[in-house]
Amino acid sequence: MKSTQKKFLEILLTNGGFIGQAAKAAGIHRTTHVYWMKTDSTYKQKFEEVYQEATEELLDEIECKLVEKAREGAQWAVTFFLKAKGRKRGYSFKEEPSSKKLPEDEKPPTIWVHTQEEAEIVESIISDARQGEPAPPGSVGIYPKGVQMVTG
């Protein structure tokens, strides 16, 4: 293996498996890595080993942080952990019977939030909407076929 390949793989191992960042730090373009993958079977095999190890280490680190948050009492962390790791004890995502499933274009959107406070606000809005409460002026309604601004 070339010294640049070794350098790239060493960086990849320490940065959690982020290819673009590792390429930049190693002084190569990410397409160089793609070229090596296509043309160098030894490199490809070593990359797959290093990538697996890097992502497993990162996953372990993130799981530890999740457990820390759950132990601190963060409800979102407790819920996520139980859904992910507590299946054998009955905690799981519930699937609707196939007869009740909505077509793809009618499913509600996924809403990503960055803080517990944002999650609580979204939960409150959804809860109010389910109870038929009118949306406050200036709020945004998200529907499967578009977004609607509620004006007052």
Image: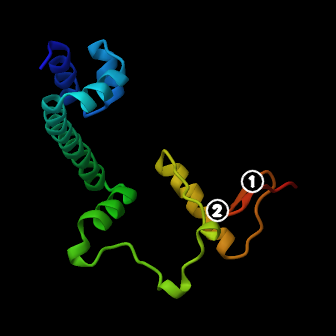
Q: At label 1, which amino acid type do we have?
A: Ser
Quarter placement of the C terminus: bottom right
> Which residue appears at 15% of the width and 20% of the height?
6
> In this rendering, would 109 be left or right of 85?
right
CA distance separating discs 1 and 2: 10 Å
Spot occupied by residue 62 in the image (x, y as percentages of width and height): 26, 44
Q: Residue furthest front?
A: 39
> Which residue appears at 43% of the width and 78% of the height?
95
Seen in the picture, residue 57 relative to 28 is either above or below; the reply is below
> In this rendering, would 106 be left or right of 61?
right
Spot occupied by residue 138 in the image (x, y as percentages of width and height): 79, 51
The reply to whether the C-beta atoms of the residues labelled 1 and 2 are less than 8 Å apart is yes
Colouring rule applied to residues: rainbow
**Residue identified by numbered label 1:** 139
- Helix or strand or loop: what does disc 1 sit on? loop
Q: At label 2, which amino acid type do we have?
A: Ile
- Helix or strand or loop: what does disc 2 sit on? helix
Badge 1 density bin: few <14, some 14–19, many ≥20, Cα 10 Å? few
> Which residue appears at 20% of the width and 14% of the height?
4
Foreground residue, 73 or 123? 123
Seen in the picture, residue 149 relative to 22 is either above or below; the reply is below
Badge 2 density bin: few <14, some 14–19, many ≥20, Cα 10 Å? some
**Residue identified by numbered label 2:** 125
Quarter placement of the N terminus: top left
Q: Is residue 143 visible?
A: yes
Task: Give whichever of discs 1 and 2 has the lower sequence position.
Answer: 2
